Image: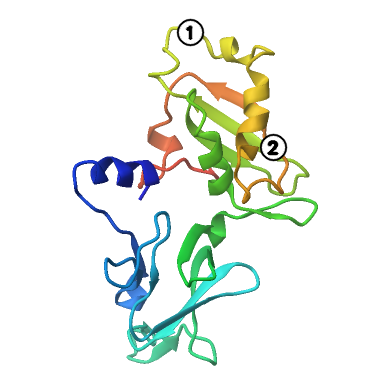
Amino acid sequence: MPIDVVRFWAGFGIVIMDAWGLTETTGVATSNSPKAGFRLGSVGRPVESVDIRVAEDGEILVRGSSVFSGYLRPDGSVRSALDDDGWLATGDIGRIDRDGYLWLTDRKKEMIITSTGKNVSPALVENALKEHPLIGQALVHGDNHSYLVALLVLDPEAAPPGRPPTAYRHKGVRPHWRNTPRSGRRSTARWPPPTPGSTAPSRSSGTNCSPRSGARRRVN
């Protein structure tokens, strides 16, 4: 849940706490809790009988009594989805802080690998870019390149549709694009700032969006 949304509802006395889990974990695997602890922006700590750890590549692994054993085949046999130690690879990328709270970063399949071998989470960079008031949507690409490129969709409320996208390519605006990903975010500071490859006048929709309303990063 976006932090600003959590804070908005908190102003009305409605407390929203994030949790995380998969169908394969029979529901919740980690959770924030009024009793066990709450950390804004995280998805909490492991629930009872569940263990989590992060692999070397950043993928979140989970095991426990609530984790399924595998996938049922048509012949009735089970194809195991666990490694020899009982860990399930979730496909999610994240980190665990020193207090045991889990922080989600991205999906493993969405990670960008640059030509220099750096693994970049596009979601982190995109979220940093969207903190700029002019940007409604952002899509970062850079597979097999030494740099990142960002497609920026202007926010229709901050950038009226009647104004052409070229108006926002003025030399006085470009420093904002360069500075946004580094604006106090330790997690994105080690990556080169994306180059604005293009700007679009309105929000993407239709074939440009996934079923969950996210931007399609790869279109065949």
The quadrant in which residue 51 appears is: bottom left
Q: Quadrant of residue 175 in the image?
A: top right
Q: Decide: is 11 above or below 134.
A: below
The extreme left residue here reads 13
Quadrant where the C terminus is found in the figure: top right
Between 78 and 155, the residue placed more toward the observer is 155
Q: Amino acid at mark 2?
A: Pro
- Location of mark 2 (residue): 193
Pinpoint residue 56: horizontal percent, then vertical percent: 65, 73
Q: Position of residue 27 (x, y in %)?
A: 29, 72
Dot 2 alpha-carbon crowd within 10 angstroms: few under 14, some 14 to 19, many 20 or more: many
Secondary element under disc 2, as helix, strand or loop, is loop
Which residue is identified by label 1? Answer: 163
Where is residue 179 drawn, in percent x and y?
65, 31
Number of marks:
2
Instruction: Judge by depth and name the residue closer to the eye, 13 or 203.
Output: 13
- Residue beneath the point at 32% across and 73% down: 36
